[in-house]
Image (tube, helix red, strand yellow):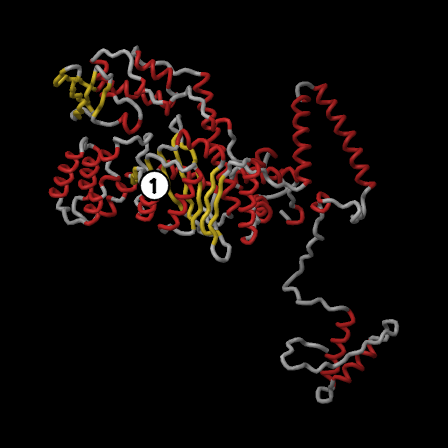
Amino acid sequence: MLKQHRELSMSIRRTIENNDEAGIRPSKTYQSFVAAAGGHHELNFIEKDVRNYITREVRNVSEQEDAKEFGKYFLRMKEKNPNFFFELELEEDQSIKLAFWADARSRAAFEYFGDVISFDTTYNTNRYNLVCGSFVGVNHHGQSTLLGCSLMKNEEIESFKWLFQCWLRCMGGNTPKGFLTDQCASMKRALEACMPTTVHRWCIWHIMKKIPSKLNGYKGHADIEQHMSHVVWNSHSKDSFDRNWNDFLVNFGLADNKWLSDLYEDRHIWVPIYLDHHFWAGMRSTQRSESMHSFFNKYITRNSSLIQFVKQYDNCLGSREQAERESDAADFHTVIPCATKSSIEAQFQDAYTHAKFREVQAQFRGKANCITRLKNSALGYSVYEVGEQVSSSIFDKFAVTYDSVAAEVKCQCLLFESRGILCRHALSVLSFEQVSQVSPRYILERWSKKVKRQHTHIKSSHDEPLMEPRSKRFDQLVFRSQNICEFAFESEELTAILHRAYDNVMAEMEALKAKRKGTSSLSHEDANLESVNELQSPPRIRTRGRPKNRLGSKLEKQIANATKKKKTKVLSEINLFDAASAAHSNCSQYQGQVINYQLRVQAAGDNSLGV
């Protein structure tokens, strides 16, 4: 427990560094050491030492150096792959105002998954209170994929304009079809200016979450929330929504509520029935962006540096890439069996990724709750009414049309239009019409597992740590040692051979170390960058109490003592010449050296003190 007996070996330090970069908390790192050692008492350090090492050595980046390391990171990534993109907007004092970056893999993935984007901002990710914004798309497995990241000093309109224009330049000027954000007026105006042809959608989850706080003062606010949700989610046409909304306001006396009035004016950017005829890849909220932010928030705090943030962003990119690779491998090596004998289901089984085929199967199972009734038919064009039992006493009705000539089916629920998945109502009609194969237009390439996508051949950006030579040598030795141990542990004979080799090598190294023990020199003739990097500072001397501003010599102490004695003996007669003579008499023991003191008269404006 004594501080002088506690130390972290090179092996421990490298493990701490690697775990910190991977986002593993210090407490978990320490517990892994305890488990490996066989208990707390077997370790010669405590958890506080691990935390102190991380704070002082691993994360010790000053605010002056942080921005420089942030810029160096971008330059290293650009050098590794020229398609890495970044832009910075600086203040007059050269501090960072706005930053955006996207790696080469994200730029290539935009070609396939840039049709719908979710953008959201979050706080408390760095010590400078810069706002983090992430551009998130959906890949062919329905997984979130990062398509760019930003840091902003504020959320003003001009800041968002700069960011969106920068992102468009990064993606070759191609605008997405749909863009999801939270209910932010600055974002809305910036999007209208930068992407006028893009359909803007507000996150419906954020709006519905505000109902309790906005309507809490009304009597029966729980019933108000329930009825409003029913109007929003169960209106299957624009006209029915308008009627249901007006009835809702009248029934609860909410016609004068400004918040609800504003929401109705903006209904075209948040109500599902006004938006679901556009493709949204299954997104109705910004929760995909928020899930990315929750990843950051596990490992990033308000005290984190910029370089820590980009390292964790790299980790997030790597985890997303790995998830996609694993899903691609599962699609290639395994097959999900069909749940029915339908040849239409077999079509989707052959074409779609596992995740999307499971969504199709969910619609086939839901078809069992549907009852199909033909309302009218003429010249191959039929109109059906499909009743779906959603509970024991509630049936929802949907109008479905089928054109046998064009092989086209359309449902009122707009599931295919918004998510790219044929709904159970349409499948019921196709089954009623005895259709064995759906038109290729209903098998989207967007969800296909057979498309060769170029971004899968590009690795996500990852910054290699800048290690000192000693750490590099240690890692190389550990790597080779592990390979030897993997070979030797198979039998007792091989293990004994390795033990003898270890003993011989250790004896030889100890002998060499003892021979070289002592001082060493470093001259300009044989010095190089590696040897200079290995230079260590002299050991720090810790003193008790507050150190003096200047440590005086022995002579100065004798002079001070003599002066003090003289002052106490003859306070009224002391002068500078007496002090000098006393000093001269006291310094005769120093080999006859004479100390001359001169009184220098201060000039006007001279703040220095001279004796």
Outermost residue to the bottom: 572
Viewer-proximal residue, 482 or 98? Answer: 98
Outermost residue to the front: 173
Residue at image location 13% in from the left, 16% down from the top: 378
- Residue 157 shows in the view: yes
Viewer-proximal residue, 447 or 11? Answer: 447
Percent across and percent down for residue 5 are 67, 46
**Residue denoted by label 1:** 195
The relative height of residue 9 versus residue 456 in the rendered view (above or below) is below
Percent across and percent down for residue 315 are 50, 36
Percent across and percent down for residue 359 are 33, 23
Residue at image location 64% in from the left, 45% down from the top: 6
Left or right position of 333 against 267 = right
Left or right position of 288 against 610 = left
The relative height of residue 520 versus residue 174 in the rendered view (above or below) is below
The relative height of residue 475 versus residue 265 in the rendered view (above or below) is above
Residue at image location 30% in from the left, 39% down from the top: 200
Percent across and percent down for residue 608 are 66, 75
The mark total stands at 1
Outermost residue to the right: 591
